[in-house]
Amino acid sequence: MLTMITVPYLNTGLPGFLTQHAVEIHVKKHHQAYIDNANKLLNGSDYEGKPITQIIQESSGALFNNVAQHYNHCFFWNCLSAKIQQIPMDLEEFFTNNFKSYDNFKAEFINKASTLFGSGWCYLYKDTKTGEFKIDQFTNANNPVKDGNIPILTVDTWEHSWYIDYENRKAEYFNKFFEHINWKFVLENYNTATGRVQKEKNLPKVEPKIKRHPQNK
C-alpha cells in the first residue's frame, strides 16, 4: 500500500512561503486523495506490491495518474525546507558548468515553471539516455521517472499548490520557492545522478522493504 511520508513542516507551514493552512490542505486533502485512489486501484491488481517506479513506467490511465501524483508530491515535499539553506559548493559548480550560473539556472527554471499552461510539474533531472541535465515541463501527473530518468528538483505548478496563499500571483510563488529549497536533498539527488552516492530518502513506498529513492530498487 502507498502511505503518506512524513512532512516535517505539516503543522507549521513554511513561513515566508506557504502558510500552515495551505500545506495542511495540500497534504491532507489533495495528496491524501491520490494515495486513497491509488490504493483502491492497486488492491488486487498485477501491480500490487510492485516498486513505485515500475508502476509509473508501466501503467496508464487512472492508476498511473494517482501513483505518479503520489510520487510527485513526495518528491516535492522533500524539496522544501522550513529553514533557509546555503547552496552547497558542489551544486554551485554544477549550475555554473551546466547553466552558466546559479542565477541563469534559477531564471530558466522559473520561466519553465511559470509558462506551463494548465496543471503539472517542472523538474530538473538527468536524462539517462544522453547524460544531459535538463529543465522541463511535465503536464498533469507526468514526471521524469516515467522515461527512466533521474529527478533532482521539482516544483508543483498545479493551481491548488499556490492559489490559497498567492491567488493570481503565481510568479511570486515560484520566486519564494527558491528561498525554501532543501538543498541537502537536491545535492543527494545530484550525487545519485552522477553516481557519487546511493542513499535512501523519504520517498513513497509500496512495500515495507522498498528503498526510498527511485534508482535504488
Image (spheres, grey):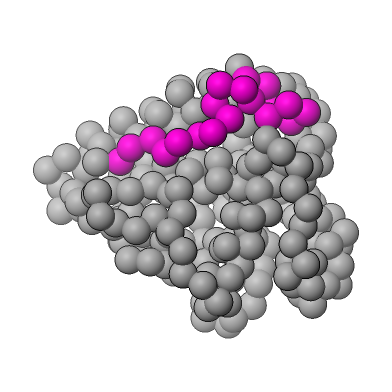
Q: Which of 26 and 89 is in front in this view?
A: 89
Picture residue at 34% right of the left edge, 58% below the top? 211
Picture residue at 83% right of the left edge, 72% below the top? 96
Position of residue 72 measured from the top left corner of the image (x, y, whole percent): 49, 46
**Is residue 152 found inside the magenta-colored segment of the image?**
no
Q: In which quadrant of the rendered view does residue 63 lie? A: top left
Position of residue 26 measured from the top left corner of the image (x, y, whole percent): 53, 27
Position of residue 122 measured from the top left corner of the image (x, y, whole percent): 64, 51
Q: On the rendered image, what quadrant is the C terminus found in? A: bottom left
Q: Nearer the viewer, residue 29 or 208?
A: 208
Q: Which of 136 and 149 is in front in this view?
A: 149
For the question of whether residue 116 can be seen, the reply is no
Picture residue at 42% right of the left edge, 67% below the top? 215
Report the residue that reaches farthest toward the left: 44
Highlighted magenta segment, given as a residue range: 2-20
**In the image, is residue 171 above or below residue 91?**
above
Report the residue that reaches farthest toward the bottom: 130
Picture residue at 31% right of the left edge, 30% below the top? 36
Horizontally, residue 101 falls left or right of residue 98, namely: right
Report the residue that reaches farthest toward the top: 21
Q: In which quadrant of the rendered view does residue 58 lie? A: bottom left
**Is residue 17 found inside the magenta-colored segment of the image?**
yes
Q: Count the marks: how many?
A: 0
For the question of whether residue 39 can be seen, the reply is yes
Horizontally, residue 156 falls left or right of residue 215, namely: right
Q: Nearer the viewer, residue 66 or 32?
A: 32
Q: In which quadrant of the rendered view does residue 98 lie? A: bottom right
**Helix, strand or loop: magenta stretch:** loop
Q: On the rendered image, what quadrant is the N terminus found in? A: top left
Position of residue 182 measured from the top left corner of the image (x, y, whole percent): 66, 48
